[in-house]
Image: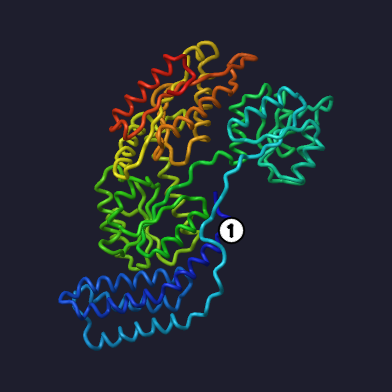
């Protein structure tokens, strides 16, 4: 979820304040590197470090709007480059000019105005809430059923049998969406009339119409009354849920995951705040040599990386990353104050996908990152996801399990897995139709996505079999989570392909825990054995 704009502004202002507070230390580091150039027997490392520090200060200062400081840092960087290329210390005349630039840099910093006291926190805490839906329905049995079923999938439903009461409640508390039956009592246009009132007063409120009517006049009336969706009765629960998700944005796609590799901690936090405000999930890395561990642990959709860093350059790091086939399609976007086009093309030639020059416009950064991350996710989904459910396919979920076991072993943490299987699924297909069976599978997938933690992973292991990976989770906690999903799933009402066909389904689950079971292969075997035991004990249980 994107941060509130005023909160985001406070975050960015606090980051700017923190950058200014650290300027004396940055200047001290530049001055020390300048001294080291003349004290060391080999000046090349010190020259590289001094040039890197000037480059970093240039990018940070311009990003935070300190243009005068950025200009001085840019001049220092440019004047140093010939000496860096020759790996020799500047001659006396050049040294005097560089001394003057360092002194000028300190004057600019001292001239900065005093900042007001810090306000707010950098953290943006958000509380997840259930999406609120108002339903206009005068059939008591139908309204109770809808309220209960929607509750299983994260919707809080409030039911009204009088249009005026629903309209008054919207004025008091705006819902995420409304589901309006067109016919209430003897009034065959009650829902349509209410829709006109709601659309007039709250034009952005999503409206879904429900009716036994399926004629063009009813559908056209719903469109003219602001309807964004139309479902027919008897209501197909899964179809209604899909429409609610679409119009309300309740079941949002997981945010794009962006890894920011930037040795300047202040800039890393700044870019992270911008991207988080745009709804993305970020992680920052200030030690570039730890890149492979970070990629394995975070699995980003995109890598945002500086060009000049300690220990190695961004171009060198990109070449290392491209040596690993699994990261061959990972977008790498360079973000640097480097404005030399030949240098930029060289970085792209060595594995980069785009090059943004600091200071970069916030909107341009968000757009460039978002477009490439979206494309990557779509391509990955096509390669590693099951077509019907969108879950990870059999091969990919097994690969991830191997990686997660390795991570748990290195971190000395626990890991649990669960093997889930729908009970009597062949009988469901035979009795109610294969389309109904598909809807049962999709209902379970929705429930898993809603109830599992953000760090958990789930894949379709077989036709009606699913594998859930629960990192940092001991078996007891895993049992409570999975058994809660099992119990909730058993209460969902499913619709068959024939008229008035309503049925329930159940699942069985088997668990296994690392390090009690020490390899991915043995975890799968143990979970499968536990699943077999759940079936043997009568199904609809977790073992």
Q: Nearer the viewer, residue 63 or 299?
A: 299
Q: Nearer the viewer, residue 518 or 119?
A: 518
Residue lying furthest right: 186
Residue lying furthest left: 41
Rendered view: 194 above or below 29: above
Q: What color scheme is it?
A: rainbow
What x and y, as percent, mark residue 82? Answer: 24, 76
In the rendered picture of this protein, how many numbered marks are placed on residues?
Answer: 1
**10 Å neighbourhood of mark 1: few (<14), some, or many (≥20)?**
few
Residue placed at 40% from the left, 44% from the top?
376
Q: Is residue 229 left or right of residue 108?
A: right
Q: Is residue 498 left or right of residue 285?
A: right
Specify the quadrant that holds the C terminus: top left
Residue holding disc 1: 5
What x and y, as percent, mark residue 530? Answer: 38, 22
Q: Check disc 1 and report its element: helix, strand or loop.
A: helix
Q: Quadrant of residue 49?
A: bottom left
Residue placed at 78% from the left, 30% from the top?
161
What x and y, as percent, mark residue 113? Answer: 52, 80
Rendered view: 159 above or below 50: above
Q: Quadrant of residue 494?
A: top right
Q: Nearer the viewer, residue 499 or 266?
A: 266
What x and y, as percent, mark residue 300? Answer: 39, 47
Residue placed at 47% from the left, 16% from the top?
539
Rendered view: 168 above or below 13: above
Rendered view: 324 above or below 542: below
């Amino acid at each position: 979820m994107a941060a509130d704009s005023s909160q985001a502004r406070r975050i960015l202002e606090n980051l700017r304040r923190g950058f200014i507070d650290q300027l004396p230390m940055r200047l001290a580091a530049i001055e020390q590197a300048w001294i080291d150039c003349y004290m060391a027997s080999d000046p090349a490392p010190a020259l590289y470090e001094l040039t890197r520090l000037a480059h970093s200060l240039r990018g940070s200062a311009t990003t935070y709007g300190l243009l005068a400081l950025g200009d001085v840092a840019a001049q220092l960087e440019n004047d140093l480059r010939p000496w860096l290329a020759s790996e020799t210390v500047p001659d006396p005349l050049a040294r005097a000019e560089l001394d003057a630039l360092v002194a000028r840099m300190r004057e600019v910093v001292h001239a900065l105005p005093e900042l007001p006291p810090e306000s707010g926190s950098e953290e943006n805490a958000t509380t997840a809430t259930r999406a609120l839906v108002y339903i206009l329905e005068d059939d008591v049995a139908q309204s109770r059923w809808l309220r209960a079923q929607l509750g299983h999938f994260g919707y809080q439903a409030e039911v009204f049998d009088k249009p005026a009461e629903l309209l008054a409640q919207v004025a008091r508390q705006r819902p995420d969406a409304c589901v309006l039956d067109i016919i209430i009592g003897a009034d065959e246009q009650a829902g349509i009339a209410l829709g006109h009132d709601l659309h007039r007063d709250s034009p952005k409120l999503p409206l879904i119409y429900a009716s036994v009517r399926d004629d063009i006049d009813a559908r056209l009336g719903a469109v003219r009354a602001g309807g964004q969706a139309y479902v027919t009765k008897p209501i197909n629960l899964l179809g209604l849920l899909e429409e609610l998700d679409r119009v309300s944005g309740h079941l949002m796609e997981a945010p794009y995951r962006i890894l920011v590799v930037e040795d300047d901690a202040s800039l890393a936090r700044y870019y992270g705040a911008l991207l988080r405000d745009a709804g993305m999930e970020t992680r920052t890395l200030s030690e570039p040599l730890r890149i492979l561990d970070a990629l394995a642990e975070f699995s980003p959709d995109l890598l945002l990386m500086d060009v000049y860093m300690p220990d190695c350059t961004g171009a060198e790091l990109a070449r290392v990353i491209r040596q690993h086939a699994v990261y061959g399609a990972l977008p790498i976007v360079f973000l640097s104050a480097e404005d030399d086009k030949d240098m930029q093309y060289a970085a792209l030639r060595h594995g980069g996908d785009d090059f943004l020059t600091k200071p970069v416009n916030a909107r341009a950064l968000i757009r460039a990152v978002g477009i490439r991350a979206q494309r990557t996710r779509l391509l990955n989904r096509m390669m590693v996801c099951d077509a019907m459910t969108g879950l990870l396919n059999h091969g990919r979920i097994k690969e991830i399990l191997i990686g997660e076991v390795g991570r748990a072993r290195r971190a000395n943490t626990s890991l649990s897995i669960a093997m889930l299987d729908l009970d009597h699924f062949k009988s469901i297909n035979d009795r109610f139709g294969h389309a109904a069976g598909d809807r049962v599978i999709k209902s379970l997938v929705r429930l898993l996505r809603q109830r599992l933690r953000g760090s958990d992973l789930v894949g379709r292991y077989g036709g009606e079999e699913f594998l859930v990976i629960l990192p940092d989770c001991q078996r007891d906690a895993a049992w409570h989570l999975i058994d809660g999903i099992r119990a909730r799933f058993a209460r969902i009402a499913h619709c068959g392909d024939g008229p008035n066909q309503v049925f329930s389904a159940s699942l069985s689950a088997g668990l296994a825990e690392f390090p009690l079971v020490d390899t991915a292969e043995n975890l799968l075997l143990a979970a499968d054995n536990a699943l077999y035991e759940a079936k043997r004990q009568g199904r609809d249980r977790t073992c």
